Image (cartoon, rainbow, N blue to C red):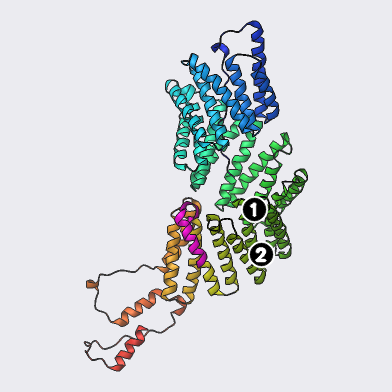
Amino acid sequence: MLQRFTSFFFLFIPLLLLSQPEPKAQSKVGMALRMIERGDSLLEANQYQQAIELFSKARTATDLLEIRAMAATGLGSAYRGAKDYTQAENSHLEALQLRRSAVSSTGILPAVQENLAVTLNNLGIVCRDMKATKRAKDYFTESLEIRRKLAEKDPKKYSSNVAATLNNYANLLSDNSDLVTAEKLYQEAYEIYQNYTGTKTPRMLAEKSATINNLAALYVSKKDYTKAQTYYEEAINITEELSEERPEIFEPNLMTMCTNVATLFSDLKEYNNAIPFFIKALYYCNKVLGRTPDVYLTDLQLLHNDIAVAYLNLGDLDGAKEHLKEAEDLCEYLTKIYPDRYPTGFMALYENIGYYHAARKDFTTSIDYYQKSLKLRQELLKTEKSEEVYFKLPMTYMSMGNVYVANQDFKNAEEMFTLALQACENAKNPDSDNALFYTYKSLESMGNMYLNEKQLKKAETNWYQGYRILEDLVKKKPNIYAFDAAEFSYNLGKYNLSKWREHPNKTNYEQANGLFEQAIVYANKVKGPKSDKLKELTKPFLLELNPPVEEVKEEEKPAKTKKEKTDKEVDEVRPAKEEKIEKQAPAKSEKPVKEEKSKKEKKAKDTEDK
């Protein structure tokens, strides 16, 4: 899953803004500030409970409004880290009340206004976590309004804060599928960072890296993979520099960013490019584990699994073997730690191990692992009813069916594909996009099975039934399903091309050519190397089926016999292997054709027409 990073911070301001307290009060203020500073360090180390205790004490240590507001802000951040969003919102609301009071009495001071903007920004983030979209928008809008006014007067000091709120607001919009507006806000934030002339502090660079990472994630959502890759790599470069000074803070982010890039390449089927980034993510994961044992073990297991999948897709079984073993060992260890919730982690891994053994032609062991995964999926469905979980079931059935096909066990294969189709029919909403998509995939797999059995009519029936479903999905959501439709059109086109080569008739010609043309149309609806590669694969087939023909206007055509026309048409579409067929000799007589033709001449012309 692609992670979006949040610009989440609060400011410490000099106490010169406040009236000088009495000596005894000064000691209380100093104690409160030390507790806040220590709490901030605990926040960075993800030690949220200890941070909550310190911020709670600091909040009651003094009556000074700004110190109490700072402590309440820290407390809100700690509660958010502990995922107690209700308490987080309450703490930030307390800070908001205190800072509105400060603004009402000293509103002309930029630092006081900025602190208010910080609190509004943080409340927007917490409301986003709580899915309270309307409240979040209101808080971000007010924060942005304050910060824009401050940046107009002092851009070096405040413009980066505008970018931070833009990033967080864009995250909210992206969550709610408003990608157009989100892109505008991310790009505005990016331009601010690119043109920033103030001091490039670690905090500012971290926020810049977060914005660039989020912009990359947005382009992944829009399937603009070229831009996504460029922005991801830029974010990684910035974060690597930051990690040299603060590895404990930035190495977890680097692990996530490298995983995102690797996943992007995997989705594009560029596994040779994906593996180095997965290995890099694995390196950072191991470094993080050295400081916080067990916290990132699940990430480690998933990385080993993802690396194994990349090697399997490259056909490098030896490269996959080691990582599959590491992932399986970690799953067993994690099951002991989390017996109630972690067995589901085995499901994808079992299927990958099943795929590995199928590639080794060990079909019995392969099916055993798939059966283990299937059992876990069925158990999970007793408690978890989400679509995401449910539609893993037909995927598992299809995978098992493909193993049976590879082993020429068509009876069991047909049973598995039938079960996959039944699972789609029995879905909570069988007309949902997910149900229809997996129905199409099941029909495609069934068709491939019948092709292996040489039952061509059954294969075509299933393929075209699935193709019609896919066409309807593309009409609704072209950005999601267009590439699948392009790929399927291409594969069906190749099938009809093989039929045309064997039987060069008009029907096979038109079906093959039409499917290749449709593949180009669908491929044009999506962007990225994956789509471009498919178009390059398709074009040569179009050229083969459509050799260039010189078109001559009707009135400019020289007089020719029907015999000559027929010979040319045959030459244009006839495969090389049929060139041995002898052509009829042209008529020797050049006399005008009589109105009454003899039966012999008519018979000769009929033969030529055929």
Report the residue that reaches farthest toward the right: 336
Residue 22: x and y in percent read 62, 6
Question: Dots 1 and 2: beta carbons under 8 Å?
Answer: no
Over which residues does the magenta segment extend? 464-482
Please, what is the dominant secondary structure of the magenta stretch?
helix
Does the segment drawn in magenta span residue 471?
yes
Residue furthest out toward the bottom: 599
Disc 2 packing (10 Å; few <14; some 14–19; many ≥20): many
Q: Where is residue 417? Give x, y as percent.
A: 62, 65
User: In x, y percent, where is residue 200?
Assistant: 53, 26
Identified by mark 2, the residue type is Val
Residue at image mark 2: 403
User: Which residue occupies the foreground of this view, 437 or 6?
Assistant: 437
Magenta-span inclusion, residue 496: no
Q: Nearer the viewer, residue 41 or 71?
A: 71
Q: Quadrant of the C terminus?
A: bottom left
Q: Label 1 is placed on what type of residue?
A: Val
**What is the number of the mark on residue 309?**
1
